[in-house]
Image: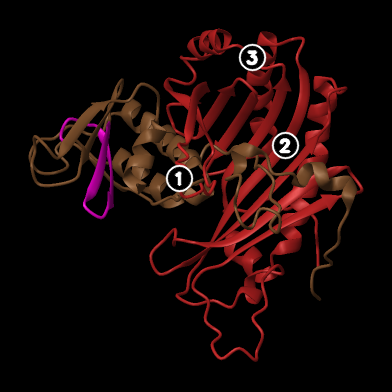
Amino acid sequence: MSATLSVQPMWDLYLRRSFDSGPTSNAFSHLVRTTPSSQAARNPQLTSTHDEIDRLAKLPVGWDGHGSARPNEFALERGRQLIEDAYQNGAEIGWESPHVSASEDGDVVFEWWRGIRKLTVYVGPKETTYLKSWGPNIVDDMADGVLEGSWEAALWIWLLA
Amino acid sequence: MSLQPRHYKHAPIVEAVIELRVAPFVTPAKLQDLARALNAKFPLQAPMQLTQFTAVGLVPSADQVVQPTILQSAVGHRLTNAGNSRVAQLRQDGFAYSHLAPYSKWSPFRSEAREIWSRFRALCPDSKLTRCALRFINRIDIPSEKVELEDYFQLYPQVPKSLPQQDVIGETLSLQMPQNDIGCMANVVQALVPPGKPGHVSILLDVDIFRLQIEDWDDDAAWSYLEKMRVRKNEIFEGCITDRTRELIDK
């Protein structure tokens, strides 16, 4: 038996799109009525990225055979929230899952590529830094900085521009 | 078909969430104090942030450039216990408590959530409740490279036999279902997700039940209502799966 589809105005409040749940000019917004979800700690859309972070959490000291530190547990936690915040930001304009790895210092490393642009984010236990690159010249084709919050929307806009 | 709740040996719950939202919001300073106070129980803490765009997606005329405005603000703190099995989100607009896999039992989960809620509530005793929710995200890992959804689920999309190809490699089914009898909404999402184990097909079954317009409720009313929501969540879950899935998660 197929689902019974109906219009029930008394439930409109539950179906109204809030601004933060999608782009204002989404062509389908009047067709696909969605509701903001209850906020999970791990968005199901990010399952594979969280699984990758979980995999990093199990790495031992010297995991790369060169004496590297095991990923720092505070960096892992900050990385989990960064990816949630980045997704909540990026999903509105287009999301791509990052490559997830660890640095020799125990930071969590997220990398995105788009054409010649590459965005690398290093999440440490207390600080998050980024590196933008758009060519081979390490002076003229790169920029770096420190994230003030857990994520910076301008980075995503730069990557997708 | 039985809709009776069962306790499965290997419940496929990857995350269970209890969420309550409030207005007026809680101040950042108070949230910071609570996060510090909970540090012994939840030593892993990270800031949470909200990003909002304005003017995104607008189509400018030929001589006009529309620059998106970005509003970023800290909204709270994500607190995780040492075993990485519980996460508390302390947000300005409310509180969420998550039980990550492996799921244990409702009763202790609810008690833990209520204990932290009471501390959150102390920050905003005059705020009204605006929303309460219960969300259970399940991932069913089926040991096969190819499955017929109807063997494992009573909820599934039907591909017409007349279509030239029948294979499906991506699926998302999202239903917004008013629960008229108990006055809340159920969002049910079923989706094909990356395999949780090699050689498996993994299906997400996300049941998110919530109620709005509860400003006149006190805390006890909301927590009692969560029990009703839990019963409904179980009914929806049991109604969406088949015995074959029950065998799979009860082995």
Q: Which residues are magenta?
A: A104-122
Residue located at (26% from left, 42% from top) = A119
Q: At 60% across and 52% down in the image, what residue appears?
A: A26
What's the CA distance linking mark 3 and mark 2?
19 Å
Kindly identify which chain the residue marked by label 2 belongs to.
B
Helix or strand or loop: what does disc 2 sit on? strand
**Which lettered chain is shown in red?**
B
If you read the primary sequence from the N terminus, does the residue marked by circle 1 or circle 3 appear first?
A: 3
Residue that carries the numbered disc 3 in the rendered image = B26
Colour pattern: by chain
User: Helix or strand or loop: what does disc 3 sit on?
Assistant: loop
The amino acid type, in three-letter code, at marker 3 is Val
Q: Are marks 1 and 3 on the same chain?
A: yes
The residue identified by callout 1 is: B63
Separation (CA) of disc 1 from disc 3: 44 Å
In this picture, residue B208 sits left or right of residue A76? right
Q: Quadrant of residue A132?
A: top left
Q: Chain of mark 1?
A: B
Q: Residues within 10 Å of mark 2 (few under 14, many from 20)?
A: many
Q: Earlier in the sequence, mark 2 or mark 1?
A: 1
**Contact flag, marks 3 and 2 (Cβ < 8 Å):** no
Kindly indicate the quadrant of the structure image that contains residue A53.
top left
- Closer to the N terminus: mark 3 or mark 2? 3
Mostly what secondary structure, the magenta segment? strand
Check the rendered structure and report the hue given to chain A: brown
Figure quadrant of the N terminus of chain A:
bottom right
